[in-house]
Amino acid sequence: MSAEKVNLGAELAIRSLIERAPLASSLAQAFKAEGFQLALVGGPVRDAILGRLGNDLDFTTDAHPHQTKKILKSWADNTWDTGILFGTVAGKRGDTTVEVTTYRTEKYDEGSRNPDVEFGETIEGDLSRRDFTVNSMALELTGKEPEFIDPYGGLDDLVKKVLRTPVSAAQSFSDDPLRMMRAARFASQLNFEIDPEVFTAMSTMTSRISIISAERIRDEFIKMLMSENPRIGITALVDSGLAEMVLPEIPKLRLEIDEHHHHKDVYEHSITVLEQAIAQEERLGGPNLVIRLAALLHDIGKPKTRNLIEGGGVSFHHHEIVGARLSKARMKALRFDNETIDAVETLVALHLRFHGYGDGEWTDSAVRRYVRDAGDLLTHLHVLTRADCTTRNAKKAERLARTYDSLEERIAKLAEEEELSRIRPDLDGAQVMKLLGISPSADVGKALDFLMELRMEHGPLGEERATEELLQWWKARRHP
C-alpha cells in the first residue's frame, strides 16, 4: 500500500477518533504510564475511517488480562471481566464502553465449539487472526504520534468494498467457522462484495459450521437480518450452501418451476416481502426483528404443502399453519427467546387471514376476530399483510391496498365504538358462578367461551342481555 493511502487512513481514523471518542486518548495514556501499548483495533478502526464510529470501542494490548483489569479499574467507572479467560476485560466510562484484549492467536479444534486461546507478542500477529482485512487495521495510540497499522491491505479493500481474509480463507474459516456467517453479515451491513476465494471457501466448508453453537449462529443471523440490506447476506448464505446448515427452510423456497405448472419464485417473493416490510417499519417504531423474521419465514410452509393442480397451476393449502409450526421449530433450534418465537409463529399463522374475506365483505364479527387473534401484534400483522402483496399487476396491487385500507378503517371505527383492544365477555367468572349456582369448574370456562363467542358475533350485549343468553344456554345444556 502506498504511503499516501496509509496517511489518509490514519488521518481519517484519528480525526474521527478525536471527534467521536475523546476518552480513547486518556485510556491510551493510562496504559502507556504502566509501560504497555494500546491500539484501537478491528471494527472501530474501519468505522472511524468510514466516519461512523460509535461508542463501543475495541482495543488490543500487550498487557496481560490481569494487568489490563488493574488499569481499567483505575480508569473506568465500572469494569467486568466475564471474557478474561479469552484475554478480554471490559469497562465503561461515561457513554463509552471499551473492550481491551491481549494480543492473541486462536483456533478451533476439529470437534470443539470453543477456541483455544494463546496470547501473542505482536500486534501484527494479533491482526493476522482476525476475520477480514477491513477488520485487521489498527491505530496504535501509545507512541509519540498515533500510528496506522494495516499489514493486510484492509484500507485498499475498504475502498474497493470487498471482503477478504488476512490469511487464506480456508485457514481462517477452519480456525473459526463462524467467520463464514460473518462474511454474509458484513456483506449486508457494509454493502460489500465477498471475494471469490472467500466465497469458494464458504461453499466448500459448510459442514464446518456444525461445531458452532446455535446461540452464536443466531446472533450473527440477527445482525445480518437487521442490516440495511439483508438480501445480500441471505443470498450469500443460500448460494454458498451455508443456509442448508443453519436455516434450511429458506433455500427450500427455491421451488423448481414445473414445465406445465408455472408459479412465482417463492424465495424471491419472500425476500421482496422482507424488503417491503422493512420499508414500513416506521409503523413499528423503527427496525423490528419480529416483523423481519415473520416476513422472511411467512411462506416456509409452501414446500411441504405444494400440490400440482390438474390442468395447470399449483396450490399450497394450509401452508400458513405448516409454516407457523416450522417457524417455531427452527427458531427454537436457534435458541430464540420464547416471546420472539411466539410472536413470529402467530404472525405466520395469521398472514393469510385477510385474503379469506374476499374483496372487503368483512362483517363486524370478522373484524373483531381479526383484532382478537392478532392481539398486541395487530400493527405487525398490518405491515406483514401489506408487504405480502408483491404482484406486478398494478391494478391488482391497488385493489388489495384499497381493500386493506378499508379494513384498517373498519378496525379503527369499531375500536372507537367497542374498545376492541380489550374485548371481554359481558360477564366475568364470578358473575357466571353466581347466576348458575356453580363452583369453579370446567363449566365456568365453557360459559365464558359461550359469552365470548356472543361478544364476537354481536358486539357488546350489556349485562342484562348477556344474563338472559347465559341462562338460556345453561338451560339447554341441562335439558337438551
Image: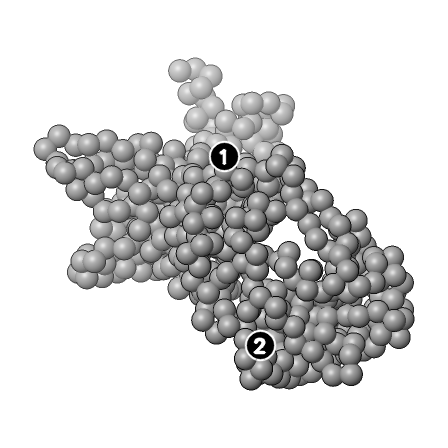
Gap in angstroms between the C-alphas marked 1 and 2:
42 Å
Amino acid at pointer 1: Ala
Q: Secondary structure at mark 2?
A: helix
Percent position of residue 416, x then y: 44, 59
Residue 2's spot in the image, x, y percent?
54, 80
At x 72%, y 74%, the residue is 140
Crowdedness of circle 2 by 10 Å Cα count: few (<14), some, many (20+)? many
Q: Does residue 357 appear left or right of residue 64 in this picture?
A: left
Question: Residue placed at 30% from the left, 51% from the top?
Answer: 269
In the image, 355: left or right of 310?
Answer: right
Instruction: Answer whether labels 1 and 2 touch (C-beta < 8 Å).
Output: no
Circle 2 sits on which residue?
Answer: 49
Is residue 76 shown to the viewer in this render?
yes
**Residue linked to disc 1:** 329
N-terminal of the pair, mark 1 or mark 2, is 2
- Image coordinates of residue 142 in percent, x first then y, are 78, 76
Say above or below: 317 vs 148: above
Residue 54 place in picture, x, y as percent: 63, 71
**Apparent side of residue 383 relative to residue 71 in the rendered image (left or right):** left
Does the rendering let one see residue 385? no
